Image: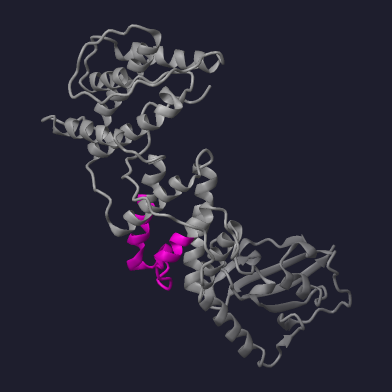
C-alpha cells in the first residue's frame, strides 16, 4: 500500500513566457565558465531523470527555463505562509486532474466536493462528517483500492474552492472519498497554518491563492516552481560566490545553457557524471590548493636538508635510529609498528604512542608512502617519512583531520616483521 500524505506538497508557478531553448555547445574559456556550465548540466540531467520521466517535451522544458530566469531576475512573488500553502494545494489538485484523487488513478477527482470538504475542515464544520470517521474511512478505502486493480477513474469534475462552509449531500462512494480527503486536509491546514487567523483574512488569502493556482496553464506547475526557486537561489549566491566559493563568479547564461543541455541529454562537452566530478575537483582545488602548494614548497626545502633522502617516487625519509638486523619487510609482509603522524604545521592527527599500543597491518593495505617507506626499514629502526599528497591520502584527504592535498610527516618505529 502506498503511504498516504494528507498535506499536499507542490507550489504555484507562473505562466511560461513561451521562449524556445535549444541544446548548444558552449564556449568555455576558463575554469569559472566550466564550473558554471557543469553546475547547470548536472542539475538539468538530474531534473530530467527524477522529475520529467513522463513529460520532457519542448514546452515543459521551456516552462522550466522561463521560471529559472524569473527566479534569477527576482520576479517571484513573495507570499505569506497561508497564501503559499493555498498555492500548494491548488497546484497539487491541478496535477491530480491527471493522476486522480490522492494520486490514485482508480479514483475520480471531484473538485467541487473536495474543496467543500477542505473548507468545512478549515471551519471545523462536522455536519457532514466527523474528523475521526473521515480519517478511518479514507485510509481503509485507500488500502482497499490499492488491492483492487479493476477500479477505473472517470473524467474529473473541475471547480473552484468556495469561501465558506456549507452542508452538502454525498450521493456516492466517490463523493465520500473526495469529501473525506478534503476535510482531512482542511483540518490539518487549520491546525498547522491558520491556527492564529482571528480575523479570517489568512483563510481568505489561502482560498484566493488556491483558486489562482487552479488557473495556472503550465504543463507541470511543480517543476516550474522548482525552476523559480533554483533561479532565486543562484541569484542569492552571487554576493558570496557560486556554491559558496568566493573565487567563483556566477555566469547565469552558462548555467542556463547547462540546464538546457542536461534536459535534452546533450553531453558533447561533458556528461553528467563528468560534470559532477569536475565541480567537486575544482571546489577541492580552490579550497585546498594552498595546502598543495605549501606541501610542495615544504618538500622542496626539506629535500635540501642533511640526512634527508628522496626516492624516485618523491618519498622523503631520514633515519632517526638504525636497526641492527638485516631483514627488510616486503609489500606482502605484516608488520608491527609504533608511529606518530603530523601535518606540516605540526598538528598531530594520529599516534599509537598516545594510545599506548602498537599496531599491526599488512604493508600492501596502507597508503603508498608507508608501503614503500617501511620496506626500507629493519626491525629496531626508526625513520621519519615525509609523504607527498599523491603517496598519502590524495586529493580527498581522510576524515576530519587530514585535508585534501595534505603532505604528511610520519615517525615510524618497526618493532616486528610477522
Which residue is depicted at the point 20% across and 14% down?
166
Position of residue 315 in the picture relative to residue 124 (left or right): right
Where residue 387 appears, as percent x and y from the top left, is 67, 76
Q: How many marks?
A: 0
Residue 60 magenta? no
Asked whether residue 169 is in view, the answer is yes
Position of residue 377 in the picture relative to residue 24 (left or right): right
Q: In the image, which residues are magenta?
A: 228-257
Which residue is depicted at the point 35% across and 56% down?
69
Asked whether residue 401 is in view, the answer is no
Where residue 112 appears, as percent x and y from the top left, is 29, 19
Q: Is residue 393 above or below residue 184?
A: below
Which residue is depicted at the point 52% across and 63% down?
24
Q: Quadrant of the C terminus?
A: bottom right
Where residue 88 appears, as percent x and y from the top left, is 32, 36
Q: Is residue 379 above or below residue 398?
A: below
Q: Residue furthest right?
A: 326
Residue nearest the viewer, comparing 387 with 358:
387
Residue nearest the viewer, comparing 62 with 342:
62
Residue nearest the viewer, comparing 58 with 415:
58
Where residue 295 appears, as percent x and y from the top left, is 58, 80
Amino acid at each position: 500500500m502506498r503511504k498516504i500524505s494528507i498535506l499536499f506538497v507542490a507550489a504555484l508557478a507562473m505562466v511560461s513566457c513561451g521562449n524556445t531553448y535549444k541544446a548548444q555547445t558552449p564556449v568555455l574559456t576558463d575554469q569559472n565558465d566550466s564550473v558554471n556550465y557543469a553546475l547547470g548540466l548536472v542539475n538539468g540531467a538530474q531534473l530530467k531523470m527524477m522529475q520529467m520521466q513522463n513529460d520532457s517535451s519542448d514546452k515543459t522544458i521551456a516552462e522550466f527555463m522561463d521560471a529559472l530566469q524569473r527566479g534569477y531576475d527576482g520576479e517571484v512573488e513573495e507570499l505569506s505562509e497561508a497564501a503559499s500553502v493555498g498555492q500548494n494545494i491548488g497546484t497539487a489538485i491541478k496535477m491530480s486532474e491527471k493522476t486522480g484523487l490522492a494520486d490514485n488513478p482508480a479514483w475520480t477527482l471531484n473538485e467541487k466536493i473536495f474543496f467543500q470538504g477542505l473548507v468545512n475542515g478549515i471551519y471545523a464544520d462536522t455536519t457532514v462528517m466527523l474528523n475521526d470517521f473521515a480519517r478511518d474511512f479514507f485510509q481503509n478505502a485507500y488500502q482497499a483500492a490499492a488491492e483492487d486493480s479493476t477500479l477505473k477513474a472517470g473524467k474529473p469534475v473541475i471547480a473552484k474552492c468556495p469561501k465558506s462552509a456549507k452542508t452538502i449531500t454525498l450521493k456516492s462512494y466517490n463523493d465520500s472519498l473526495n469529501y473525506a480527503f478534503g476535510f482531512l486536509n482542511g483540518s490539518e491546514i487549520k491546525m498547522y497554518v491558520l491556527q492564529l487567523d482571528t480575523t479570517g483574512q489568512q483563510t481568505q488569502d489561502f482560498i484566493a491563492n488556491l483558486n489562482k493556482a487552479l488557473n495556472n496553464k503550465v504543463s507541470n506547475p511543480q517543476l516550474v516552481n522548482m525552476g523559480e526557486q533554483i533561479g532565486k537561489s543562484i541569484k542569492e549566491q552571487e554576493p558570496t560566490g557560486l556554491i559558496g566559493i568566493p573565487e567563483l563568479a556566477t555566469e547565469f547564461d552558462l548555467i542556463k545553457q547547462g540546464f538546457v543541455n542536461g534536459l535534452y541529454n546533450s553531453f558533447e562537452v561533458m556528461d553528467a557524471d563528468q560534470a559532477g566530478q569536475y565541480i567537486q575537483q575544482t571546489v577541492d582545488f580552490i579550497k585546498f590548493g594552498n595546502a598543495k602548494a605549501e606541501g610542495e614548497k615544504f618538500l622542496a626545502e626539506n629535500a635540501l636538508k642533511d640526512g634527508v633522502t628522496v626516492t624516485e617516487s618523491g618519498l622523503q625519509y631520514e633515519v632517526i635510529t638504525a636497526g641492527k638486523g638485516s631483514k627488510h619487510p616486503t609489500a606482502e609482509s605484516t608488520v608491527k609498528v609504533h608511529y606518530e603522524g603530523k601535518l606540516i604545521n605540526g598538528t598531530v592527527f594520529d599516534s599509537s604512542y598516545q594510545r599506548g599500543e602498537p599496531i599491526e597491518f599488512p604493508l600492501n593495505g596502507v597508503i603508498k608512502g608507508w608501503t614503500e617507506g617501511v620496506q626500507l626499514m629493519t626491525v629496531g629502526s626508526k625513520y621519519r617519512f615525509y609523504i607527498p599528497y599523491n603517496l598519502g591520502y590524495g586529493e580527498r584527504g581522510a576524515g576530519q583531520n587530514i585535508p585534501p592535498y595534505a603532505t604528511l610527516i610520519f615517525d615510524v618505529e618497526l618493532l616486528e616483521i610477522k
